[in-house]
Structure formats: structure tokens, C-alpha cells
Image (spheres, grey):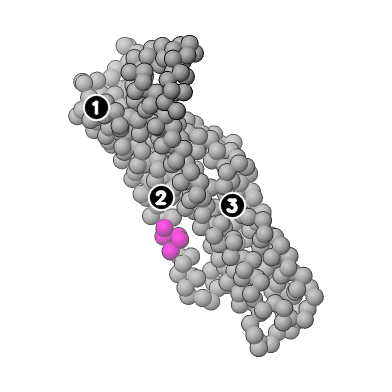
């Protein structure tokens, strides 16, 4: 393996790439990566909000037809649903604090640890522009990026958790639909099961529409996360300076928190809840009902739930905790490769 790597590194193409690397390394400071990824994060989220504004409005309108918590008489289910609302609120506050904390750290690092040039980002500074104008402009850009990220991710996690809560309510309704020794008229059974089937189909369409709205953005987001975190881990390991290490660590913490708490974990909760529907429907004593329409409806629900329901990234990846772990493994793999190559070059 080492001989193969040595041969690759000694090839003409690699030597040419080495010269490019050494040239770029003179000009690209670690924070240039932060600049680029912040720009990509902001542009991606802003474009998603702008281009998908009509779809987001449709999602909001669709949510108006969701089941009300008052339709559920289980106290534990209601408590869980209210807990999800509290979790979303808390996580949004933490995200805002984390992202604005990044801005404060950038400011503190520039003022306290800088070389006299109070600059948050590595950018071109025209001589005719006063320093305080550049300073205020950089803060404005960072605030704009944070606002776009919070708005986009707040809408996304709300849609995911609302869908997850609705699947929980429909599962509870199915579980109590055919209670043994409970007398119902045939019309009552038909009406109740029809409502369950219709709402289940409505939820599947809601998740599908959510994917059509945010899928491309999520794929671009994962690509940016992998690139940014790979370089930031490398920055921490090289210990360029206290300022560089501090910025990189805070930046890594904020991005990984955002990835796990606003994408992977909600996606996993939604998938877990949808997987319960077929089991709940199958064990709901539906076979004791002599109505052919009821049997057909339950079989339809079971059949529809055989297809996994998940939040998609570009139609390629499902957003869940498994994807989060795979993303971290990819980040560390590219980080180790980058470190190996740069050590050989140095």
C-alpha cells in the first residue's frame, strides 16, 4: 500500500498537482474555507427559500388539514406531541445561539487574537474603503447567512416533525379502531377506516411534496458539510494558530449540531413512526370485522407502508442517523487522505 502511494505521489501529474498545492497554500488561509462554505451555505439556503417559496406555501396550506390533537384521547400521545413542539422551539433557539455564537467568536478572535487588522473573513479589502465599513459589512453578511440558515432549517424541521406527529396520531387511531367486543355499525367502521386511509395517503403525499421541495438543497448541503468539515478537521490538527483553531472548533460544533439535530434526527424519527403503521394496522383486530370494504382498506394501508417513507437528499440518500454516521465517516476518510498527502508534500 505504501509503495503504491509513493508511486502515485511521484508521478508527473502528482508533482504538477503539488506545485499547484504549494502555490495555492501561500494564498489560501484556513478561513478562506470558512468564507467559501459560509457563502455556499447562505446562497444554498437563500436560493431554496426564494425558488421554493410557492412550494413552501403549499406545504403550510397542506398542514392546515392535519389532525388536531383534540382528536386523540391518549394523554401520553398528547404529551409526546407537545414535547416535540418544545424540542423544536429549544433546538431553534440553540441553533440561533450557536450560529450567532460563531459570529461573536469571529469578532473576538479578530479583535483579541488578530494582527491589528480587524477582519472577520479573508477577503479583498479595497484601500479606499474604511476599515470599520468592511467590518460592519462582514458582520452584515454573516447575519444574513445565519438568518437564511435558521429560516430554512426551521421550516424543514417543522414539516418533518409535524408529519411524524401526524403518523403517530394515525397509528393511535388505527390501534383503537377495532377494539374487541366493542359494538359498531358497519357504516361507522367504513367511515372511520376511510378517514384513516385518506389521511394516511394525505400524509404520504405531504412527505413526498416535502422531498420535492427540499431534496436538492439537502444534497448540496451534505456535499458542503463534507468538504468544509474535512478541511476544518485538518485545520485543527495542524494547529496553525490559536485563532485558527478556535474558529475551526466553533465552526465544526455548529455545523455538526445543525446536521444531526435539524436533519438526521428528525428524519430518523419520521421513518421510525411510519414503519410502525403496518404493524399497528395488522394487529388491530381488523380480521374480526366482516365488512369487505374494511378488510380491503386495511390491506391497502399495509401495502402502502411496505414502501419506506423518508426524507430524501437528491433522491439518492435518505436523511437519518445512519446517513449522519456515514457522513462523519466520509469526512474523516477525506481528512486522513488530505493529511497524508500534505505530510508527504511537506
Position of residue 77 measured from the top left corner of the image (x, y, whole percent): 50, 70
The span picked out in magenta is 83-87
Residue where numbered disc 1 is placed: 241
Q: Is residue 227 left or right of residue 310?
A: left
Is residue 264 located in the magenta-colored stretch of the structure? no
> For the residue labelled by badge 2, is the local secondary structure a helix, a strand or a loop?
helix
Specify the label residue 300 is tagged with: none
Give the answer, above or below, for where 287 lies relative to 258.
below
Foreground: 208 or 46?
208
Looking at marks 2 and 3 on the same chain, the residue that comes earlier in the sequence is marked by 2
- Mark 2, Cα crowd under 10 Å, few <14 / some 14-19 / many 20+, is many
Residue at horizontal 67 percent and vertical 56 percent from the top: 307
Position of residue 187 measured from the top left corner of the image (x, y, whole percent): 76, 79
Residue where numbered disc 2 is placed: 92
**Magenta-colored segment: predominant secondary structure:** helix
Residue where numbered disc 3 is placed: 310
Amino acid at each position: 500500500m505504501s509503495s503504491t502511494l509513493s508511486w502515485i505521489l511521484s508521478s508527473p501529474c502528482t508533482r504538477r498537482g503539488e506545485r499547484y498545492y504549494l502555490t495555492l497554500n501561500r494564498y489560501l488561509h484556513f478561513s478562506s474555507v470558512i468564507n467559501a462554505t459560509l457563502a455556499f451555505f447562505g446562497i444554498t439556503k437563500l436560493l431554496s427559500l426564494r425558488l421554493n417559496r410557492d412550494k413552501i406555501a403549499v406545504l403550510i396550506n397542506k398542514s392546515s388539514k392535519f389532525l388536531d390533537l383534540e382528536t386523540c384521547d391518549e394523554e401520553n400521545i398528547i404529551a409526546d406531541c407537545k414535547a416535540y413542539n418544545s424540542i423544536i422551539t429549544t433546538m431553534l433557539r440553540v441553533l440561533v445561539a450557536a450560529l450567532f455564537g460563531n459570529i461573536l467568536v469571529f469578532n473576538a478572535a479578530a479583535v483579541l487574537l488578530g494582527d491589528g487588522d480587524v477582519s472577520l473573513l479573508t477577503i479583498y479589502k479595497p484601500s479606499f474603503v474604511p476599515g470599520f465599513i468592511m467590518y460592519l459589512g462582514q458582520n452584515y453578511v454573516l447575519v444574513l447567512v445565519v438568518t437564511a440558515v435558521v429560516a430554512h432549517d426551521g421550516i424543514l424541521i417543522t414539516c418533518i416533525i409535524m408529519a411524524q406527529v401526524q403518523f403517530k396520531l394515525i397509528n393511535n387511531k388505527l390501534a383503537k379502531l377495532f377494539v374487541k367486543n366493542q359494538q359498531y355499525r358497519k357504516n361507522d367502521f367504513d367511515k372511520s377506516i376511510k378517514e384513516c386511509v385518506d389521511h394516511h395517503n394525505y400524509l404520504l403525499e405531504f412527505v413526498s411534496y416535502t422531498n420535492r421541495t427540499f431534496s436538492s438543497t439537502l444534497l448540496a448541503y451534505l456535499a458542503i458539510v463534507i468538504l468544509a468539515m474535512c478541511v476544518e478537521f485538518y485545520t485543527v490538527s495542524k494547529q496553525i494558530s490559536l485563532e485558527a483553531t478556535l474558529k475551526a472548533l466553533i465552526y465544526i460544533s455548529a455545523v455538526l449540531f445543525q446536521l444531526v439535530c435539524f436533519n438526521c434526527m428528525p428524519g430518523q424519527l419520521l421513518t421510525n413512526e411510519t414503519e410502525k403503521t403496518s404493524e399497528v394496522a395488522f394487529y388491530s383486530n381488523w380480521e374480526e370485522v366482516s365488512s369487505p370494504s374494511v378488510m380491503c382498506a386495511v390491506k391497502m394501508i399495509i401495502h402502502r407502508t411496505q414502501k419506506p417513507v423518508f426524507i430524501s437528499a437528491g433522491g439518492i440518500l435518505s436523511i437519518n442517523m445512519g446517513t449522519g454516521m456515514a457522513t462523519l465517516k466520509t469526512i474523516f476518510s477525506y481528512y486522513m487522505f488530505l493529511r497524508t498527502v500534505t505530510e508527504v508534500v511537506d
